[in-house]
Amino acid sequence: MNFPLKTTLFTIIYGLNFLPILFAEKAFYGDPPDAHHPWAVHDRHRPQPEVVTPAVNVGDAPSDAIVLFDGSNSSFERNWRHSTQVDHRAKDWIVKDGYMLVVPGAGSIETLELFGDCQLHVEWAHTRDISGSGQGRGNSGIFLPGGVEVQVLDNYNNPTYADGTVGALYGVMPPAVNALRPPGQWQSYDIIFRRPIVRHGEVLDPGSLTVFLNGVVVQDSTPLEGGGGWRKRKPYNREFPKVGPISFQDHKNPVRFRNVWCRPLRLRSYEGGLDGRISTDLALNKRREIAKRLRLDAAGQPDIKRMLLLFESVYYEADSVSLEQGEDLAQSFLYECQTASRDKIKEKEETVKEVYRALKYMQRFGHFSKENGTIIALESLMDELEWK
Ligand code: MG
């Protein structure tokens, strides 16, 4: 192998490796939108994540959380009600010293606000003085919309049936581990709840529960299986309400709660969300919308910018008119370059390369043939100028 050939091979291999980086930074992106993704890989049109300011201390409410209990009487009054009507209720829950306390016989409490899929933070504590055993010690529960219970129980050196242990999806799935602190200490739950989506009896998504107990994962995207209950399985395809209250249980044990906040989660594709792999209908609708906006943006722009926007619109939605208009603009630009003086053309080096990259991207994804005359002519011009 002689030296020039080695150099050529090196250039080709190095060039191939480098090409995707250039494409990602300039003109277009990675793999284009497809039947299930309205955006290209690294697409600049993909909406930016909303900015949320986290709390100073992890576990406290971030800026976008709905604070359901901040320790004050007024936040209890504003956000909660007793599930049992006042005529049938002997007592009320008590709010004092920054916590709310189950008063046996007062019944459960529930949020006035209704939630669907959500992230929920709750802290709770059992009494230091132990009384009762098994399910009778420090029993309460966090009921998520649709009636799924995350068990609250003092299982510190107090075993019970596994699927009713603290951290259990009650009646369905035991916690992976028991990460409870001794009674009297504050415990925390961070819960991510996704309701099942059932249409005409068909389970599109069984829903899921993820739970951290004192920062330790105890449920990990556990399918809800309809949500369990005491000694009962519920139908796998049970329909859940779109939204419902979050409820804390009165199980006749004096459990304390504090620092409760909740954040609704982004929509899944079944509900119109656009993230992840989505249905062809949704993807094509969104692609059409982006293409339309790009074509509107293209009108009135200088030639090169217009060409780039028109090409870009084509990979969201095939459109021969936009493709032809874009290619016409590329051809005019090519002609301008071919007839320009050496000095003038040097000023256009960056633009020439940008147009070339855009054309090659379109070619790579099948919009132009391998024999496309504009691309071949631009390549020979760049060869001549030693710009490739
Ligand atoms: Mg319970």
Image (cartoon, rainbow, N blue to C red):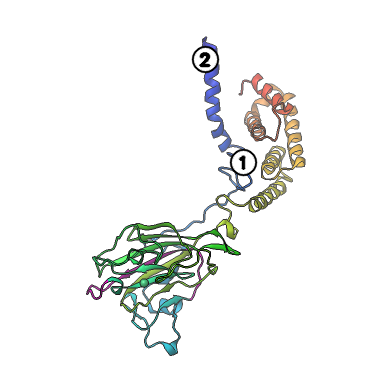
Q: Is 116 contained in the magenta span?
A: yes
- Between circles 1 and 2, the one closer to the viewer is 1
Question: How many residues crowd mark 1 within 10 Å: few (<14), some (14–19), many (20+)?
Answer: some
Front-most of 267 and 51? 267
Query: At 64% from the left edge and 34% from the top edge, which residue is drawn?
Result: 361
Q: What range is drawn magenta here? A: 112-133
Real-space CA distance between mark 1 and mark 2, rounded to the nearest whole angstrom: 34 Å
The percent position of residue 160, horizontal first and vertical second, equals 29, 67
Question: Measured along the vertical axis of the image, is residue 108 above or below residue 375?
Answer: below
Question: Measured along the vertical axis of the image, is residue 257 above or below residue 196?
Answer: below
Query: At 28% from the left edge and 69% from the top edge, which residue is drawn?
Result: 154
The percent position of residue 278, horizontal first and vertical second, equals 59, 51
Dominant secondary structure (helix, strand or loop) of the stretch shown in magenta: loop
Element carrying mark 2? helix
- The quadrant the C terminus occupies is top right
Question: Measured along the vertical axis of the image, is residue 93 above or below residue 348?
Answer: below
217 left or right of 286 in image = left
Q: Amino acid at mark 2?
A: Lys
Query: At 23% from the left edge and 73% from the top edge, which residue is drawn?
Result: 128
In which of the image's four quarters is ligand 1 placed?
bottom left
Q: Amino acid at mark 1?
A: Pro
Q: Which mark is residue 32?
A: 1
Residue 86 position by quadrant = bottom left
The percent position of residue 61, horizontal first and vertical second, equals 41, 64
Q: Which mark is residue 254?
A: none
Residue, disc 2:
6
Question: How many residues crowd mark 2 within 10 Å: few (<14), some (14–19), many (20+)?
Answer: few
306 left or right of 171 in image = right
Q: Residue furthest top?
A: 2
Front-most of 340 and 366? 366
